[in-house]
Amino acid sequence: MTTSPPTKSFPQTLLARYFPQQITHRMTAEDWLMRGFLALGASFLLVGVVFPLCPMVVRSFQDTDGHWVGLANYVQYISTPALLTSLLNSLEIAVASALIAVLLAFGYAYALTRTALVGKAFFQILGMLPLFIPPLAHAIGLVYLFGRQGLVTNGILGLPGWDIHLYGAVGIILGETLYLFPQALIILITALNLTDARLYEAAQALRTPSWRTFFTITLPSVKYGLMSAIFVCFTLAFTDFGVPKVVGGDFNVLATDIYKQVIGQQNFSMGATISVFLLAPTLIAFVADRLIQRRQTSLVSARAVPLQPKPNLILDWVMFGFCLLIALFAVLVFATIILASFVKVWPYNFSLTFKHYNFDNVGGGGTAAYWNSIWMSLYTAIFGTIAVFLGAYLVEKGRGLIWLRSVTYFLSTVPLALPGLVLGLAYVFFFNNPSFLGLPISNPFLGLYGTMGILVLCNVIHFYTVCFLTATTALKQLDSEFESVSASMSVPFYKTFWQVTLPLSVPTILEIGGYFFVNSMVTISAIIFLYPPTLPLAAVAIVNMDDAGDIAPAAAMSTLIVITSMAIRVFYRLLTQGLQRRTQAWLKK
């Protein structure tokens, strides 16, 4: 954008003094190009986030034939005891799972960041292990351990049997805690790492007891991280479908109710109504989290000193035992899934076999489902990373149209509040409708329905917010002087982006791509209503195998998904190290 200064060749007249010439900005082709990209990014989010929600909410006010019935569906839902019980069950499960997961994750994160624990890197890897396992696979592992024919239930290695009554609230909370633990751990490790060691040195100089230091320095410094972890875990547990599907038994929750209404009874209107109930608490949690985060202030200044934990024999060994128990349980569940995939007949014949990896003899889509998931995850990683990084760049480094950049930023954060089931069902209502939002015009996106494209789009939007915030955080760390100097030298913004911003952001871009790939491999809820019969997917195949009673093949497919996700992370690590040596060498100078 160039500025034409007011002319100085005319004498300053009285008129010019009181009515000075306005500064005008002459739009260049480059400015129009940037604004065009920004409008394109906002349109992408409108199509992917806002438009699909409109027909879903409208459908909740219609009957199965599409006639307007007002609040009848909501009245029916509330007046049906079984359905209302599902809402209360979901709240109970979400609160209990979130509190237990955050409590355990806080102890684990505290051990990793504030103690001289032996084997920190080892425990950090094991703490993240459940992140690579689909929620439904967690539940399958628990069935093999604590189910009616489970090893623990019937006794193992001569130990007496222990029946925890897995099917119901106990099983769901146990499975959700496993699923939520690494999510909370990531947030809390980040929060605990941002601490100024000078506060602890001052407390030590004043001979403050350890317990008082914990309650007056440690807890206040991580309170926003704790709140954020609780809100995130509550939302994930409230909307999760995989764990309740396998171990829920007669304990119904909202997520399984939507599945039963849509898949079982083909009652899309009631499915939309339950989706609104599922959406409401997550929206409240999302807004509350945003409001609380606004009050967060910087606790680390430029003079801050990183904390170096000092050895404490008793505390270190207590935390070692605590972390070992959690890590062993996560490994035990994962090892059970692998073992079950190789055992002939659990628990009667433990001889090993590969027959469960022959998916052609079971339902769910066979080996094609596995390869379809890999292609879908690869497309999601490629197109999602491009969309997210370009969107974040235009919002963070763009010029002009401040209001549109603010709208784009807001729309980029909305997907975090959308449960996967709600997003998938909303896509069915929007992309499978011949008319566009009820208007007398054809839907230009109708051809996308039933293709790989809509699966990729749904996954990109489902995981958009976390990647967007990661990208904007990385871009904020790049000095705006790069853009200023480029503008002063008349270098187009796209050249600066390609030659400066992109190379400096390579590690972040790879991290975003890996996040998209791994989550697309394990997700079920967002795509279970969207996948066509010609495109079976691995995560959905696990659901179908579980429904058909083929638990061992479901464990085999889960094992393939986990191994693939972990291989991608290893590949990402190797690729990052290589690229960092080439693009980040300036950091070592």
Image (cartoon, rainbow, N blue to C red):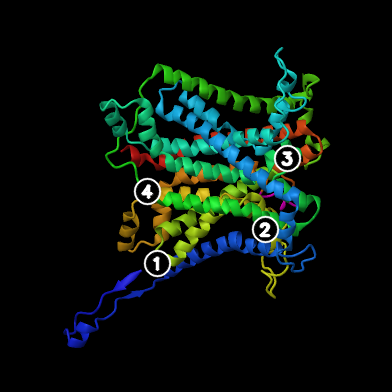
> Which residue is at the front of the view, 356 or 268?
268
Q: Which mark is residue 400?
A: 1
From the top left corner, tell me how far across and down residue 277 is, in percent. 65, 54
- The numbered mark, 2 or 4, whose residue comes first in the sequence reads 2
Q: Are marks 3 and 1 in contact (CB under 8 Å)?
A: no
Nearer the observer, disc 3 or disc 4?
Answer: 3
**Considering only vertical position in the picture, is 517 above or below 306?**
below
Q: Residue furthest top?
A: 158
Q: Are marks 1 and 2 in contact (CB under 8 Å)?
A: no
Say what amino acid the circle numbered 4 marks. Gln
> Which residue is at the front of the view, 206 or 119?
206
Q: Distance of mark 1 from mark 2, alpha carbons? A: 33 Å
Q: Distance of mark 2 from mark 4, alpha carbons? A: 36 Å
Q: Is residue 381 left or right of residue 141?
A: left
- The numbered mark, 1 or 4, whose residue comes first in the sequence reads 1
Image quarter in which the N terminus is found: bottom left
Look at the image and give the residue range highlighted in magenta.
Answer: 526-533
Q: Which mark is residue 427?
A: 2
| Residue at 36% across, 61% down | 491
- The numbered mark, 3 or 4, whose residue comes first in the sequence reads 3
Say what amino acid the circle numbered 1 marks. Gly
> Which residue is at the front of the view, 430 or 446?
430
Nearer the observer, disc 2 or disc 4?
Answer: 2
Q: Distance of mark 3 from mark 4, alpha carbons? A: 48 Å
Q: Distance of mark 2 from mark 3, alpha carbons? A: 28 Å
Q: Which mark is residue 251?
A: 3
